[in-house]
Each structure stands twice: as C-alpha cells, then as structure tokens.
Amino acid sequence: MRVLLRILAPLLGLALAAAGVLFVIEVVAAWVRPDATTGLVVPWPDWRATLEGLTWANTPVPAIAITVAVVGLLLVLVAIAARRSDVHLDAPSPEIAVTTAPRVLARLVGTRVRATDDVAGASVTASARKVSVSAQSWNDSTPELRSTVTSRVDDLLAELPLRRRPRVSVSVQERKGPR
Amino acid sequence: MTAPAAPTDRAPAPAPAPAPAKLRRRSRSAVARSAGGDRWTMVIVGLVLLAAGVLVALLSYGVFGAARAGRPLLDPMIVDTLRAQPLVSRIVAIVAGVVLALLGLVWASNSVRPERRPDLLIDGGPDTSIVVSSAAAADAVASQAGGLPGVGRAKARLVGDESAPALRVTLWLADDADVRDVLRRLDSHVLTTARESLGLSALPVAVRLELDRSHPTSRVA
C-alpha cells in the first residue's frame, strides 16, 4: 500500500494543480473576452448548458455521486493501510531504534521450523503481534509434533530481542505419501 | 571530506547531548522516509470526496426534500448571485484556483522530492570548520558495520538536516547471526567510534535488520 501511496500522492497533487490552473485560465479568459462563446482550453459553456439542464434527481447524478464517494473511501483506506508494519526490537541504547520486516521474522521462524525432523514443509505468516505457522508432517510423525514446533518457535522468539513478544499459533497437517 | 581554514590551538568542547526522549524520537523517525504528509493529505482529500459524494447522493434521492432534488445542478439562484457581484466573484474564483494549484504543486513536489543527505558540520574551533560529506561518513560506518561477526553486508546513509542529523543503517544478517550480539557490537564498536571521530555528542541511529541471501542446503545427506 505504501507503493500505491507513493504513486497516487504526486498524481493527485498534479491533478489538483492542473485543475486549479485550468480554472484560473478560464476565469481570466472569460473576464478579458466577455463576448467569447467558447472556452479557451475547456468547453465550459457546453458544460454549463448541461449542468443547467440537469436536476439533482436526474439519472447520472446519483451514480456519479456514489462513484465519487467510493473513490474517496478508497483513498482514505489506502492512506490508512499505508502505515509501516515494522517489527520493533530492543536496542542497546536509547538513541538507537532497531526494526525489521515481518517477512524477516517469518523467514527466521520458517527456517527453524523446517529444520525440525518430522516436518516436511511449513508456511509462516508473521506480524509484530502474531506468528502463524502451518506445518506439514510426514504420515509417520509423532503426535507431539505440534508442541515440538511451538517450543522451537518459542525458543527462537526468546533468542531475538523483540520489544513485544508475538503470539504463536501452530497448526499441523499430515502430508500423504512416503517420506 | 574537506578541512579548510587555519589550525586551532584548543579542541572544541562537544555540544551537550539532547535529552534521551528527543534522541529516541529522532532515531525512530530515521527508520524510513516519512509518508505522514502524503497520508494525511490523502485522508483529507478522500474525506472531502466521500462527504461530497454522500451528500449529493442523499440530495439526489430526495432525503433533503423532493423540491431540492428537482432543482438544476447549476442553480439559477446561485448564478444570479454571482452575476450581481461580478468583480468579487471573479477575484474569489481566481484566488481559489491559485490556492488549489499551489496546494497541488506543493503536495506533488513534497511527494517526489528526494530524501536529504546532510553533510556533517564539525566545529573545529574559532577559525576552523570541518565538513564531512554525507557519503564519506555513511561509507565509513557501513564498512565498519559490514565487518561485524554475523553481518553479511551493511549499508548506511545520513538523513535529517544539518542541525539534527541521524544515521540509517541497514544490516543484512546471516541466518545464524546472534542479533543481540550484533546490535551490542554495532553500538560499542561502530557507532561509538563514529560519534567520537565525528566529534558528535549524540547521533541518533535507526537500524534496519534484513536477512542475507540464504544458501539452501539439503537436509538429506
């Protein structure tokens, strides 16, 4: 979402600037050419005639209003979702701030889980608050695999100087077929 | 790195360090380029569009009365009011257009403006000023940090402004790196040396940890 914000922000800024410039040009042009029947850059006399002939209840108006409202809502959602999702770590001194990306935490957890003997594969999603592990076990693995994986993830999180310890959620599915 | 002007007879005393809370705030803001301005502006533009769209939709569906919904979009009453005061209307319209254009240009330019890389100005005494270029200081820190055990490579850059510089360091760690040890060594070996050699009483630092490219090995011998 931050990439989308970085793309949209200058485009919206330029669109606002262009609208302002066009508005000023047309107002000044209409002022200095009072007898002109067409706009200098945009055909605003035609637009004015259309707007004078339409009422608020006419067909395209509600649809356009709803579209504008949806676009506004999407912009608000993009701006809210564009916050950083860093994982914060404890620093050795107050003038140092240490962060990492959730994908780094997920990769560390995934590497540790996949190194477990009875685990055939694993997928991990991580955030600063929660780490979810979905492990696949071999069909001859022990029933205690879930607690083993949870313990290994807990050990890893204890080794890392995380400012906030995320909750760990582990699920184990059995993989069919020979090892 | 440049060191013009005359030599001095006494070393300058370093400036007093800012309060820890201020240092913490500066180090946090150095983590990444801020998108706060873009986010707030986009929220305001989005809320304006949302409010306008909702109000017009309600007006269209007759929530404010059927008579209002039946009025033309360009109401003759408003047009007559504007025509009664043509000079004022034109001036207000021009000012509104100029303000809109300026706001848009400021927003766009702030969005695409590259992040600043401040040079460090070191007070060498009454007749001496030393300028350490941003790239030189950052490269020195990066090369030292890259030599720490467990660190595959490192990148550094100075951010902020000349009066309140901060350092952003990105470390690519090996999979088996001891994170606590790396951070402790970075602080005690690299950053302390950097502060001392640059003559800074405080240098807020934002450290970004990444994992170096892994070299997958088979678990089956």
Image: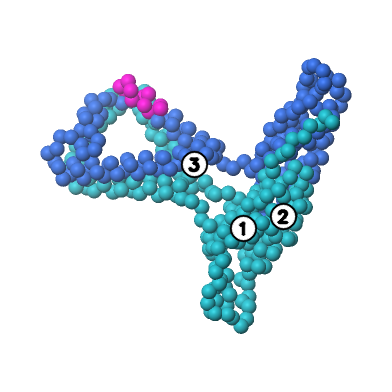
Chain colours: A blue, B cyan
Report the side of A48 relative to A73 (left or right). Answer: left
- For the N terminus of chain A, the image quarter is top right
On what subunit does the disc labeled 2 rest?
A: B
At a point 22% along the width and 43% down the height, the residue shown is A27
Q: Pick whichever of labels 1 and 2 is earlier in the sequence.
A: 1
What residue occupies the far top of the structure in this picture?
A177
- Residue A88 visible somewhere in the drawing: no
Check contact, mark 3 vs mark 2: CB within 8 A. Answer: no
Q: For mark 3, what is the residue?
A: A6
Stretch in magenta: A57-67
Disc number for residue B139: 1
Q: Is residue A62 magenta?
A: yes
The correct choice, above or below, for B95 with respect to B46 in the image is below
- For the C terminus of chain A, the image quarter is top right
Circle 3 crowding by C-alpha within 10 Å: few under 14, some 14–19, many from 20: some
> In terms of image quadrants, where is residue A176?
top right
Q: Looking at the image, how many numbered discs can be counted on the residues?
A: 3
At a point 71% along the width and 37% down the height, the residue shown is A107
On what subunit does the disc labeled 3 rest?
A: A
In this rendering, do the residues under marks 1 and 3 share a single chain? Answer: no
Under mark 3, the amino acid is Arg
Circle 2 crowding by C-alpha within 10 Å: few under 14, some 14–19, many from 20: few
Q: Nearer the viewer, mark 3 or mark 2?
A: 2
Q: Position of residue B210 (x, y in %)?
A: 67, 44
Q: Position of residue A168 (x, y in %)?
A: 75, 34
Q: For mark 2, what is the residue?
A: B147
The correct choice, above or below, for B192 with respect to B66 in the image is below
Q: Position of residue B170 (x, y in %)?
A: 64, 50
